[in-house]
Image (cartoon, rainbow, N blue to C red):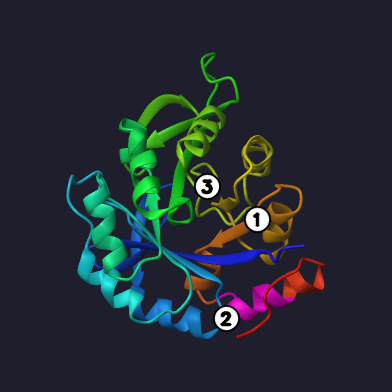
């Protein structure tokens, strides 16, 4: 059995580490570079960096901050925000990232997934999906893709989009529930499992982690290959090793170094 992965998410705005609840009320909480170093040294498996306003502000990603974070971690490092072309993605990889997170641009131009996959390999392409529950009769799964940091509904069914992205060349999918984001009440297990059952590539549960039991549920009931956390680490309630030890004690296979 493959080990499950613990991934920390750095949401960055204007070079500062921030956290929101359901993508609103965003507050500055620290420095992304020092946070990255701390989590890496404590045994984190992987790090994700999102420049959360690059797409909505129609600007390029803050490449200097990406470089600064990359200089502190020697684990898989995934970056997203404002990436609209193969050239944008190349700059991020040259700055030290190992994976590209595509979100808003991939929805508007799905072929970008295929282009980036062809240029850098499937293993380097992550589709990041921001999802809200929907009662629209046109959204058969009950979950809709939204873009531009949760501001723009697309009418796109989350499950259909996941399958399309896999076909286009995405190597893994981050399933981020906006309804659960920052609540610390647990992941959106039904959504995560729907996606996990429909694709053959790894699925990362995101949005709502508040205690180790929530990660256990996402990695078992939700069918996720990895769980992404933010608040649990950023606010000092848990360390990386606290979470890993707890999951290990619940019978989840984890990489226990650190």
In this view, the residue in front, 122 or 176, is: 122
Q: Is residue 177 left or right of residue 113?
A: right
Q: Position of residue 205 (x, y in %)?
A: 59, 51
Q: Residue at x 69, y 38 (%)?
A: 197
Give the class, few, some or many, for how many residues have Cα within 10 Å of label 2's Cα (few <14, many ≥20). some
Q: Residue at x 17, y 50 (%)?
A: 59
Residue 26, placed above or below residue 133 = below
Disc number placed over residue 43 in the picture, else none: 2
Q: Which image quadrant for residue 30?
A: bottom left
In this view, the residue in front, 245 or 3, is: 3
Helix, strand or loop for disc 3:
strand
Disc number placed over residue 200 in the picture, else none: none
Q: In the image as oriented, which residue stretches furthest toward the left?
A: 59
In this view, the residue in front, 100 or 68, is: 100
Q: Residue at x 45, y 45 (%)?
A: 127
Give the class, few, some or many, for how many residues have Cα within 10 Å of label 3's Cα (few <14, many ≥20). many
Highlighted magenta segment, given as a residue range: 237-245
Q: Which image quadrant for residue 247?
A: bottom right
Query: Of label 2 and label 1, which has the lower sequence position?
Result: 2
Disc number placed over residue 173 in the picture, else none: 3
Residue 215, placed above or below residue 172 = below
Helix, strand or loop for disc 1:
loop
**Residue annotated with mark 1:** 225
């Amino acid at each position: 059995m493959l080990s499950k992965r613990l991934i920390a998410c750095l949401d960055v705005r204007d070079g500062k580490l921030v956290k929101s609840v359901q993508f609103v009320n965003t507050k500055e909480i620290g420095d992304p570079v020092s946070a990255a170093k701390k989590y890496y040294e404590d045994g984190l498996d992987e790090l994700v960096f999102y420049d959360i306003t690059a797409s909505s502000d129609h600007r390029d990603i803050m490449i200097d901050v990406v470089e600064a974070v990359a200089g502190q971690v020697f684990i898989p490092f995934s970056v997203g925000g404002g990436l609209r072309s193969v050239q944008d993605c190349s700059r991020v990889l040259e700055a030290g990232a190992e994976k590209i997170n595509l979100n808003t641009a991939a929805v508007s131009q799905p072929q970008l997934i295929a282009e980036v996959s062809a240029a850098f390999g499937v293993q380097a392409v992550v589709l990041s999906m921001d999802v809200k529950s929907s009662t629209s009769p046109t959204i058969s799964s009950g979950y809709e893709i939204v873009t531009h940091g949760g501001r723009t509904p697309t009418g796109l069914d989350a499950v259909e989009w996941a399958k399309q992205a896999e076909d286009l060349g995405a190597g893994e999918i981050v399933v981020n529930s906006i309804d659960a984001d920052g609540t610390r009440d647990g992941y959106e297990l039904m959504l995560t499992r729907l996606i996990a059952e429909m694709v053959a590539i790894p699925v990362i549960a995101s949005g709502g982690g508040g205690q180790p039991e929530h990660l256990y549920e996402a990695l078992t009931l939700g069918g996720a290959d990895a769980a992404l956390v933010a608040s649990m680490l950023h606010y000092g309630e848990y360390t990386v090793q606290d979470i890993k030890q707890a999951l290990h004690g619940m019978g989840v296979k984890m990489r226990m170094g650190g």
